[in-house]
Amino acid sequence: MTCTRSTARSRRAVPAMVGTAVVLAMTGCSLIGQSSGEGGDEDGDDPGVLRVVTHDSFALSEDLVADFEDDTGYTVELSAPGDGGELVNQLILTKDSPLGDVAYGVDNSFAGRGIAEGVFEPYTSADLPASAEQYLADDAGSLTPIDMGDVCLNVDHEWFTEHDVAEPETLDDLLEEEYQDLVVVTNPATSSPGLAFLLATVGAYGEDGWVDYWQQLADNGLKVVDGWSDAYSVDFSGSTGEGDRPIVLSYSTSPAFEVDEDDDEAPTGALLNTCFRQVEYAGVLAGADNSEGAQAFIDFLLSDEVQADIPEQMFMYPVNEAIDLPESWTQFAPLADDPFTVSIEDINSHRDEWIEQWTQTVIG
């Protein structure tokens, strides 16, 4: 098994976030220590090992993982083959010899692909909160929703104040002349937030209108970069960026991590009328060596302790609505009241086609 290291929350973190998270991949294959489970068989396999495959941004507090190991007797081993899209690709390529026992980090833009390829063994946790049922990927329980968040355009308040320009509010606003050359987004072919924003426009304008919207947006001086870090930390005029673009694609939670301890207002804000609701799942891998441990890990991810840990470590909302959120989130990181959505079935049927159409329209 290959283990990887991750030092930054590349998909959704802002620089202020990075120091707050304990990224599990940084500790290597054995996250906490030796299992208290009983010994292996003649081939040397250890039934006390639980192999967890994630995207490269998975993070939880170390003491929670240690408690899980103590309670279950498993040694948790982590591998992270890439971002959410690469994770699904690798799970499909290795489905006849699974990379692990349980996967976390498949989101609703790629969930349908994994389900269609038979990657997951259905499991419905008794701990699934009622508030999470709306996010189930299918009726069979192939995947369990763990957390969710909104991908939205963010704005630099100071730039708009200094330039005496009204901040945009909607997707249509971005087509106006006053916002020419002000927007930077990420490529949906290379970026999870980029794909989510493409889906937002599909949800907003339908299959007959989203291509025309992107053509107009491109004609109005849109800038496209490959990854979130370049967009937010280089081209964006807010946060630590020194760019000239005051409108950037990020998350609704990003402004909460731009606020200093004594501030009453965030220097950036999310445009909540531009958001796509992203849901992240965990699933038992079909053919897993330790499916019982995989189920236990999913129950663990739904526990109150982990759900409460998710906002500060994973920078997403827990699917359990009964969990108390950090005070800064309630003030500076609200979810959209009416985010754009596209069904997992439609995404799975048209994802590649939509990305190709987008590339032809925007990149040429």
Image (cartoon, grey):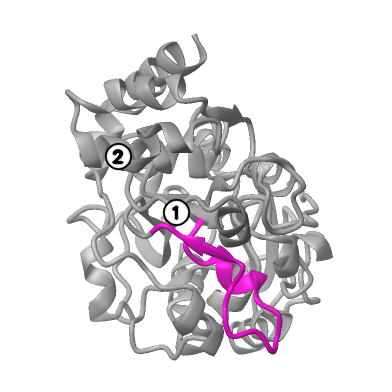
Labelled pair 1, 2 in contact (Cβ < 8 Å): no
User: Residue 361, percent across and down?
Assistant: 40, 14
Quadrant of the image occupied by residue 66 = bottom right
Q: Residue furthest front?
A: 164
Q: Which residue is mark 1?
A: 167
Q: Total of numbered circles in the picture? A: 2
Above or below 282: residue 184: above
The 10 Å Cα crowd at callout 2, few under 14, some 14 to 19, many 20 or more, is: few
Q: Nearer the viewer, mark 1 or mark 2?
A: 1
* Amino acid at the residue labelled 1: Glu
Relative to 126, 48 lies left or right: right
Q: Nearer the viewer, residue 204 or 31?
A: 204
Badge 1 element:
loop
Residue at horizontal 37 percent and vertical 69 percent from the top: 335
Badge 2 element:
helix
Q: Which mark is residue 125?
A: none
Q: CA distance from mark 1 to mark 2?
A: 12 Å
User: Residue 40, percent across and down?
Assistant: 70, 66
Q: Is residue 229 magenta?
A: no
Relative to 21, 95 lies left or right: left
Relative to 315, 126 lies left or right: left
Q: Nearer the viewer, residue 8 or 92?
A: 8
Residue at horizontal 66 percent and vertical 48 percent from the top: 232
User: Residue 137, percent across and down?
Assistant: 27, 54
Does the rendering let one see residue 115? no
Q: Which residue is mark 2?
A: 172
Q: Nearer the viewer, residue 314 or 209?
A: 209
Above or below 346: residue 237: below
Above or below 241: residue 347: above
Q: Is residue 268 magenta?
A: yes
* Amino acid at the residue labelled 2: Asp
Q: Which residues are magenta?
A: 251-271
